Image (cartoon, rainbow, N blue to C red):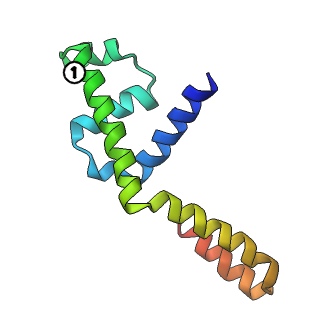
Amino acid sequence: MEEKLNKKNHYNMLYSYYQNLLTEKQKEVFENYYFEDYSISEISECLDVSRNAVWDLLKKVEINLDNYEKKLRLHQKNVDRNLQLELLKKYVNDKGLQIIEKIEEME
């Protein structure tokens, strides 16, 4: 169960970065499955396609999201930046903390 939750969180996070690189149909299937918790059967009925077509599309989206992150690293760069900002907070004065807060709000 924890592995399934980790997978869901992983792809939801990647989707937040890369959704604009997906087609409308890919977004629709992804959102129905990951956000709305529809089953593959329910999605296939709504779209009037086979369950296998939905499954294949979901796998393709997952592969695409992983590939985008592998190449562009937007999420990892964000994580790294946030870690560095947390470290920096220990060494700056109040004005520096205000600047860091503004940077964090930009996300």
Q: Quadrant of the N terminus?
A: top right
Say which amino acid is labelled 1.
Ala
Q: Secondary structure at mark 1?
A: helix
Question: Against 4, is 45 above or below?
Answer: above
- Image coordinates of residue 7 in percent, x first then y, are 52, 34
Task: Find residue 74 and report its image quarter.
Answer: bottom left
- Image coordinates of residue 94 in percent, x first then y, are 79, 84
Which sits in the foreground, 35 or 78? 78
Question: Against 3, is 40 above or below?
Answer: above
Residue sitting at x 30%, y 22%: 55
In the current view of this chain or complex, which residue is farthest to the left?
Answer: 48
- Image coordinates of residue 16 in percent, x first then y, are 44, 49
Question: Against 28, is 41 above or below?
Answer: above
Horizontal relation, residue 95 to residue 16: left or right: right
| Label 1: few (<14), some (14–19) or many (≥20) C-alpha neighbours in 10 Å | few
Residue sitting at x 78%, y 85%: 92
Task: Find residue 93 and report its image quarter.
Answer: bottom right
Task: Find residue 28 and report its image quarter.
Answer: top left
Question: Against 31, is 85 above or below?
Answer: below
Which sits in the foreground, 20 or 52? 52
- Image coordinates of residue 95 in percent, x first then y, are 74, 87
The total number of labels drawn is 1
Query: What residue is pinned by disc 1?
Result: 53
Residue sitting at x 32%, y 30%: 58
